[in-house]
Amino acid sequence: MSENMSQTPLLEVRNLRKLFPAKSSFLSKEKTYIKAVDDVSFTLNPKETLGVVGESGCGKSTMGRSVLRLIEPTDGEIIYKGQNFRNANGQELRKMRADMQIIFQDPYASLNPRMTVGEIIAEPLNIQKRYSSREEVRAEVLKIMEVVGLNPKYYNRYPHEFSGGQRQRIGIARAIVLHPSLVVCDEPVSALDVSIQSQVLNLLRRLQDSMGMAYIFISHNLSVIKHISDRVMVMYLGHVVEMADKKELFANPSHPYTQALLSAIPMPERHSKRKKIILEGDLPSPANPPSGCIFHTRCFMAQEICSTQKPELKDLGDGHFCACHFCGKCNTNA
Ligand code: SF4
């Protein structure tokens, strides 16, 4: 269990949904929707890292952006520090937004090529009007550059003059310059060379220790999730299928989908007794999700009930939740 489990949550997300209109066929008059995020609920404690994992297209990035209202959710509640974030607007919204930041996946696309490093990192400070003089802004930017391991002499350089790892440090500096309490890290290392990934992950951990931020850390890579998370939430087709403390989830995966994901992590032969579980077929379309259990079309444990009845996200105890009719009965020692 995470040490922070008993604290008052920093963030409570209840029944979050995000639907996108789908292109309807020209014969059909009915509007159809892509259910990118469907009925997702979780809490996040201060200074905690919640890893969110799932295949590409499972809705994890849409979920992260919906929580920050970078895209407006269709439904659900977002309670941040006890305040209803979905009702916030004007000054209140601006203030709450300053406390909730994001690090994007692509350090090439997420930085404006026409702005210098100093201007990029200073932008949130200027938008929030944190300082009255340019000198104060510059001093704060130089301080943050040092914190993330960027040489302050690069202040007037442009993003194209940097490597991928250095650009991601610029993105991290921009995200933390306002000293937020929550940062959504949306696949922050997946565009980087493997040799650079661990440096950036270690930087994120160090910053969390020194600045006390909570992370929602989104990744398709379970090894990265295992390295950085306190708790892990597994998503499939816009739904949460399993959530648990990291150690519990990796030791006792209950959902067949989690078991399949874990079985794919490369392990030295002598340490591994587990069988690799190959999932058949592709991820179904979120515009037309399967009936019953959304995973039944690919599940190696599926039975008759699975195609007709949707399993609830059951509490297995100690903060371990699983959405399977046979939770705890189908562990294949993955
Ligand atoms: Fe598989 Fe059925 Fe469990 Fe869904 S409910 S994960 S189909 S066994």
Image (spheres, grey):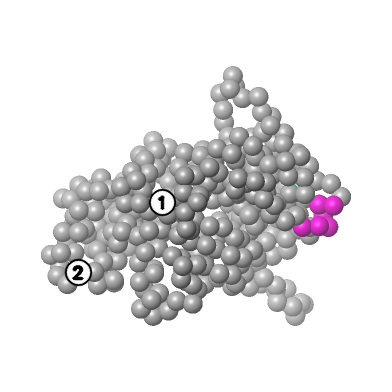
For residue 206, which quarter of the picture?
top left
Q: Residue at x 61, y 61 (%)?
A: 40
Specify the amino acid type for callout 1. Answer: Lys
**What range of the chain is rendered magenta?**
305-310
Q: Earlier in the sequence, mark 1 or mark 2?
A: 1
Taking depth in this image into account, of 289 and 251 the one nearest to the observer is 251
Residue 298 visible, this angle = no
**Where does the image place residue 266, in percent across and percent down from the top left?**
57, 31
Taking depth in this image into account, of 103 and 68 the one nearest to the observer is 68
Residue 210: mark: none
Q: Residue at x 24, y 72 (%)?
A: 129
**Where does the image place residue 274, in percent across and percent down from the top left?**
66, 28
- Determine whether, in the image, residue 178 is placed left or right of residue 313: left
Give the quarter of the figure containing the C terminus: top right
- Determine whether, in the image, residue 309 is placed left or right of residue 88: right
Is 75 above or below relative to 207?
below
Q: Is residue 306 covered in magenta? A: yes
Residue for badge 2:
131
Residue 163 visible, this angle = yes
Q: CA distance from mark 1 to mark 2?
A: 26 Å
Element marked by disc 2? loop
Residue for badge 1:
47
**Where does the image place residue 71, in percent across and percent down from the top left?**
50, 69
Disc 1 Cβ-to-ligand 1 distance below 8 Å: no
Q: Residue at x 64, y 37 (%)?
A: 252
Which residue is situated farthest in the top direction here? Answer: 270
Q: Residue at x 63, y 54 (%)?
A: 240
**Where does the image place residue 137, in percent across and percent down from the top left?**
18, 64
Q: Residues within 10 Å of mark 2 (few under 14, many from 20)?
A: few
